[in-house]
Image (cartoon, rainbow, N blue to C red):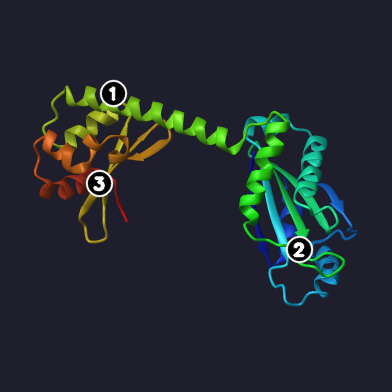
Amino acid sequence: MIGKAKSIKHTSISVDYARLKESGEELDRRHLAGETGEEIAQEFRMCQGLNARCENNTLHIILSPTIEDGQKLSNNDLREIYREYLKRMNLEDNQSIAFVHRDKAHTHIHIYANRINFEGVAYNDSFISNRTAKVAEEIALERGLKTAREVQMQKLISNKDIKEEIKHRHKATMETKPRNLNEYIETMRANKVSVEVVQSKTGKVSGLRMEFQGYIFKASEIDRKLSFENLMKEINQPIKIVSKIAQKGHKIERQ
């Protein structure tokens, strides 16, 4: 589960976004009676008026389980996560409201909490996003959910596998001995790898981009041997004519 948070100004607009979204549903609330974004913002302002020095006085928190975990979590599970988050962040006594969104199979929680409590004291939002990420990880571990670190590690492993497959297909392409970049691109395309020439605004070629099964990398990120300069040496083609070849039949992305 990934957790993000920041302090915002426009409470009513943000709350209405979460409240009115087609896939949105209120999970729970604390110390609030209003229904619309403006009504909730007015209730927030009752406390916020006690501390005029604080400008960004609403916390917007997003807690996002993985797609797989989100599909298994009921609204009651998500409600418990919301309450546990408030407890660990010492926000239980502040006004707050939570909504769940289940759009595109990606379940996530939107939380809006008043930074100003009933005594007019502002909640310390220093490093709020980092603290939220830490608490989200703790809750995920205790509930048997995947953490942000686990998701990142899986992504790294997946990226490594994809890069190795692209390198394998590059090797197979070079065994056909392409005579120029055009032939190289066409053969790679036949091997299910899309190759694009990337140019700067001045028209200078700055590198290659490769795509395979929805994964996109700079060629030099896959392997230094796949950098534009090294590839040109390998197929023995002068760099100065590459732009013309690319313009004839291959997409060029300008930076």
Residue type (three-letter) at the residue carrying disc 2: Arg
Quarter assignment of residue 17: bottom right
The residue shown at (79%, 74%) is: 51
Residue 18: percent from left, percent from top = 73, 53
The residue shown at (81%, 56%) is: 96
Residue 31: percent from left, percent from top = 89, 57
The residue shown at (24%, 51%) is: 206
Question: Which of disc 2 and disc 1 is earlier in sequence?
Answer: 2
Disc number placed over residue 207 in the picture, else none? 3
Quadrant, the N terminus: top right
Residue type (three-letter) at the residue carrying disc 3: Gly
The residue shown at (39%, 29%) is: 160
Mark 3, Cα crowd under 10 Å, few <14 / some 14-19 / many 20+, is some
Indicate left or right for 158 with 3 as reference: left
Indicate left or right for 90 with 169 as reference: right
Vertical comparison of 45 with 97: above or below: below
Total numbered circles: 3
Residue 22: percent from left, percent from top = 73, 47
Quarter assignment of residue 49: bottom right
- Residue behind mark 2: 115
Question: Which of disc 3 and disc 2 is earlier in sequence?
Answer: 2
Mark 1, Cα crowd under 10 Å, few <14 / some 14-19 / many 20+, is few
- Residue behind mark 1: 168
Mark 2, Cα crowd under 10 Å, few <14 / some 14-19 / many 20+, is many
Disc number placed over residue 206 in the picture, else none? none
The secondary element bearing badge 3 is classed as: strand
Vertical comparison of 72 with 1: above or below: above
Instruction: Give me the C-alpha separation between circle 3 and circle 1.
Output: 20 Å
| Name of the residue lying farthest toward the bottom | 52
Residue type (three-letter) at the residue carrying disc 1: His
